[in-house]
Amino acid sequence: MLWIMRFSGFFSAAMVMIVLSPSLQSFPPAEAIRSSHLDNYLRLPSQVSPGDSLNRFSFRKASVFRNADECGSTAYTITGETSVCDPSLVHVAITLDVEYLRGSIAAVHSILQHSMCPENIFFHFLVSEADMETLVRSTFPRLKFKVYYFDPNIVRSRISTSVRQALEQPLNYARNYLADLLEPCVRRVIYLDSDLVVVDDIAKLWTTSLGSRTIGAPEYCHANFLKYFTAAFWNDKRFSGTFNGRKPCYFNTGVMVIDLKKWRRVGYTKRIERWMEIQKSHRIYELGSLPPYLLVFAGHVAPIEHRWNQHGLAASPGSGSTLSGPAHSTLYGRHTTCTDTHTDNSSFHGRLSRRRRRRRRRRRRRKRAIEGRQAIDQSDLLTGPVA
């Protein structure tokens, strides 16, 4: 028995030495820590300097996505400004922001992965910070793209307070200026929110017919359109009269096909800016960048199939987490083509929504059981023996 105790003591001491000695481990602990990058992700915002904000992110280099044989090749090589004017390109515009950068990278990867002709896709990235181009280039070395700087001061004075501070970020309004930022030869563009995952060939969306309309988007005419504007708006005929002769429906601006040629000709940017100025003085809505689009385009939108935008899943209306823009929080759903995958707290809201659905199902089952018992009791009263 004594030799067993001595052996166990020796074995325990050896295990302690192995655990504490880096030289005896199969991999250096420092390498494991560096490869996980947890030290960067777990730093508090106050610990991250402005110049170090992009250093938090390190993405694995994506594989090269090639066209299928039936795609052919683009007419121009991506070496200069004129390449953007290649008529065979599919143009996609996405904002790049540090807060949602991981979501944007996932969106780009999903578009390339599900495209039959990924080499025909040209990305237009709207940014308000420097050094984004280097990060994108290191992640997607063969990607066709261009970065456009959007000056926040263009809209800062026009932005009014919203229900949530996230909706007040100037980059949310960059899509209003796509017709000015992109080259004149770009006549059509697909705008996608930065928290989307695409699970179908985006070329199918690109070929959507807009008819005489300027934009195409998924419409939700069953939604209560009145709630998107204040009582002051509906009570003032100067404002609410803008919908006279229209049948306005709520539409989601997170997935849009835009005819830039018509946009430029009509001057829709000025119209949107005008409504933003009215909002500053009359407070006609509570949301961020969505209501001006509704005011200008609702009732004049080319409807896009709902499968292109899985809207409202994992909703948490009480917390305001399902509002338009990069604040969407949506679960991945079946038969979904564009799915919101909010990069901050999406898993939490998804779990929360699932728990709520389970609780609702349990309540419904209990209610049906109670109603069933009551029906049996009533049946006994009706069919029981007569005295």
Image (tube, rainbow, N blue to C red):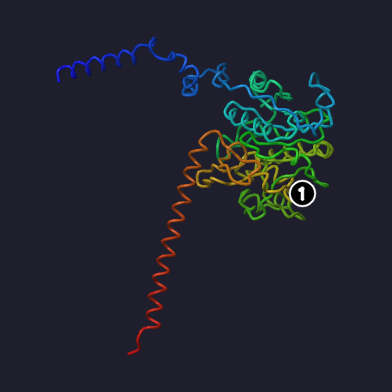
The x and y percentages for residue 63 are: 65, 24
Quadrant of residue 217 within the rendered picture = top right
**Quadrant where the N terminus lies?**
top left
Q: Is residue 271 left or right of residue 223?
A: right
Residue closest to the far bottom: 387
Q: Which type of secondary structure does the marked residue at label 1 adopt?
A: loop
Across the whole image, how many numbered discs are drawn on residues?
1
Question: Residue at the spot x=50%, y=41% of the render?
Answer: 349
Reply above or below: 34 against 312.
Answer: above
The x and y percentages for residue 322 are: 57, 43
Question: Residue at the spot x=65%, y=38% of the render?
Answer: 198
Q: Is residue 48 left or right of residue 260?
A: left
The x and y percentages for residue 180 are: 78, 30
Specify the amino acid type for callout 1: His
**Quadrant where the C terminus lies?**
bottom left
Residue closest to the far top: 23
For mark 1, does the 10 Å Cα neighbourhood hold few (<14), some (14 to 19), or many (20 or more) residues? some
Q: Which residue is mark 1?
A: 300
Closest to the observer, 179 or 60: 60
Quadrant of residue 19 within the rendered picture = top left
The x and y percentages for residue 386 are: 35, 89
